[in-house]
Image: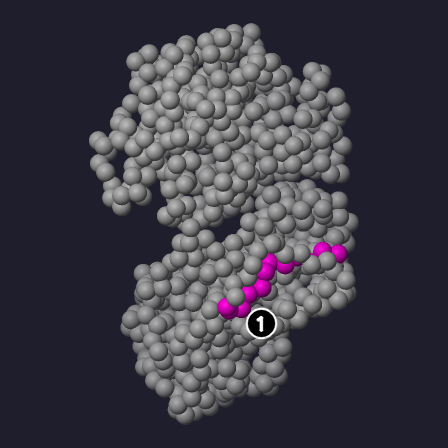
Amino acid sequence: MGIEQASQVIPGRTWPSGLATSGVAASDAALRQVLHGLPGVDQVGAEARAASLATRSVKRDAKLWALDMSIRMIDLTTLEGADTPGKIRAMCAKALRPDPADPAVPSVAAVCVYPDLVAVAQAQLAGAQLAGGKPGGGKPGGGRVAVASVATAFPSGRASLAVKLADVDDAVSSGADEVDMVIDRGAFLAGRYGQVYEEIRAVREACGAAHLKVILETGELATLDNVARASWLAMLAGADFIKTSTGKVSPAATPPVALVMLAAVRDYARATGRQVGVKVAGGIRTAKDAIRYLVLVRETAGPEWLTPALFRIGASSLLNDLLMQRSKQLTGQYAGPDYFTLD
Amino acid sequence: MAWDYAPAPESREIVTIAGEYGLFIDGEFGPAADGQQFPTVNPATEETLALVALAGLADVHRAVAAARAAYQNVWGPMPGAERAKYLYRIARVLQERAREFAVLESLDNGKPIKESRDVDVPLAAAHFFYHAGWADKLDYAGLGPAPRPLGVAGQVIPWNFPLLMAAWKLAPALAAGNTCVLKPAETTPLTALLLAEVCQQAGLPPGVVNVLTGAGDTGAALVSHPGVDKVAFTGSTEVGKQISRSVAGTGKRLTLELGGKAANVVFDDAPVEQAVEGIVNGIFFNQGHVCCAGSRLLVQESVADVVVDRLKDRLATLRLGDPLDKNTDIGAINSREQLDKITELSAAGDAEGAQRWSPPGRLPEKGYWFPPTVFTGVSQSYRIAREEIFGPVLSVLTFRTPQEAVTKANNTPYGLSAGVWTEKGSRILWMAQRLRAGVVWANTYNRFDPASPFGGYRESGFGREGGRHGLAAYLDA
């Protein structure tokens, strides 16, 4: 991927050369030219489009498919100060077999934890049999539930690069398959795009074979123009996934933000041939919300993004609502909440 | 792993369609004096929905006389605050029966349920609410002291927004103290008749609103009736001119809302993603059966390829089919006659050398359908760039400079609406000052609000509907 190729997206604009993956340091000015050359995002229009897609009616077989796919796309998450090995082990069991009563329910894509608990999760998940007969995760944990770790001084990102890289090392050497890093929003808002770019590249390097998700924390970027710019910045720097939020800031994922990010990955793939995934996280609690995001994916990025390899939902309580709606869809009646496990 | 939405049809059981419908005169439904009827058809299936009375001259006399009596004895003398109560009541009943209206509108008109449900019916109710608020404040509308109603209004409305146009006509007329004889379009009479039922339900005094169903002759008889003080017409420019002639010299007040060939102007600094949505909304909303449709896309040459490519991708996601399916984006063409007109003009586009493109996909076998269509390589001189197609057909033209955009946008006998897409606020204002159009939308399209006046220039008509300006059309100040 390279910025030169990205210029196909916006003809008539010349792009600074030397900003590709060659390791050449990116200047703030050069990146500004690229990012501020992106087409603007009209907030009113984006919100209207997201609202209109929210009226799609998903019924019967289409709903069942969406419920199963949503389960397969979940990064089952716990990011609390109070997390313990016991809590992680329970969550891993749930991730593998979300509904003990129904082995047809697929496993989720990944669990998402703090770095110090990666080893606990790995021990629990390594070699475990998947439920549902379908691979739960996408790359690189395909065939098993992956372990994702937040890193880089999550959630604020307020630490030196050295500390952030040590954090990443810690996660990767403990066996993390995926790393969810945060960008330095302060640097981004101050216009120090080069710093953000270089940090992502350094983390990308430190990840080795691990999959890199870049958290933009869109609630702090505030405008949809910034969301589009940060999306492109992360993709150009080598992100495998771009992710909306840490879940620690409100607002977290919103449909208009997801819309803008999905359009960005689509345009980026068109320009460079590389497909970057999108992860929405924070505040997604109901099956209805999840299905609305799937509709956004289908009608914005396109149906080829409807796979856990390219779309993830970071959530915790969402899983039980999906299970509840799934059993309602199959049996015609709602089971009480105590028929679903709380892990 | 293709994921497609399962069919999600809205239930048609919510609305009861009678086998036959009468005229609504003096608060009662009854047959035409000579007993004539005509069928109204579901354009998506060609099934006959109902037989509707065909009003003749005798019925027009009776309706105008009922409206005159109601004006003199009840509605004219009634204090504005009292009139407002009826209008509020109508608005509320419209909201309560919204699903019924939406389903009936989609059945009779062919428009997708998501539009009738989310646009037509809520806006119709909003018009009654808005104008109800004016009824007791007319002295303060800035039109002069103690403005007076005109008397009996003869109102003829089109088939593209049957209920909404009825609301646009009735609400301001009634708020101002006039009484009405409304003639809905021949192909879409049902929601106007349901609205008449709502008037009954709201206890509106007999004769204040009368609904005469029929065809062109009925409309002609109504507008030329000597007992009518005010004529309001929305429809084609051709019929508007005939009405204008028949009204000339009679002293009747006239407002006309006619055709359009609006330019939707996209600059190179536009928010591309939202501009594409605006283009789609501008021309494919309601199958392009919109007088203010953005049927000419004027796109700056430097971004034309990007915009057209994105547009084509987007059109490939549009879902055409059963208007009652909640996921349908494009419904049926309203009538065989209109389908023939769209087909003929599109053929002219081919013959003149424009490149036609439609997304892949099959049309339903029964009913009247036309795929979303984009013509590129269109010149100002082509018929598809000059004549109103009133269908889902977009003509793409390019421009180089803002001045050229204005020149091309204004180079049409019409002047109803225009759209401007740019991130530069100063350019929006510059364009808006120069575009000869009654409505200029900036970074949006087809937005309607009862508080905002709507109407055209030149062959798009005169007079405004909505807002304070719309009240002036029904008042003598």
What residue is pinned by disc 1?
B338
Question: Residue A74 in the image: x percent, y percent?
Answer: 41, 29
The amino acid on which the numbered mark 1 sits, given as a three-letter code, is Gln
Crowd around label 1: few <14 · some 14–19 · many ≥20 (10 Å):
some
B232 up-or-down from A309: above or below = below
Asked whether B5 or B77 is in front, the reply is B5
Asked whether B80 or B409 is in front, the reply is B409
Locate residue A340 relative to residue B393 in the image: left or right: left
Question: Residue B68 in the image: x percent, y percent?
Answer: 40, 84
Prevailing secondary structure of the magenta residues = loop
* Quadrant of the rendering where the C terminus of chain A is positioned: top left
Residue B464 visible in rendering? yes
Locate residue A342 relative to residue B314 in the image: left or right: left
Per the rendered image, the range of residues in magenta is: B366-377
- Residue at (42%, 50%) from the top-left corner? B6
Locate residue B362 relative to residue B173 in the image: left or right: right
What is the tally of numbered marks visible in this picture?
1
SS at circle 1: helix
Question: Residue A166 in the image: x percent, y percent?
Answer: 52, 7
Residue B67 visible in rendering? no
Asked whether A172 or B130 is in front, the reply is A172
B6 up-or-down from B179: above or below = above
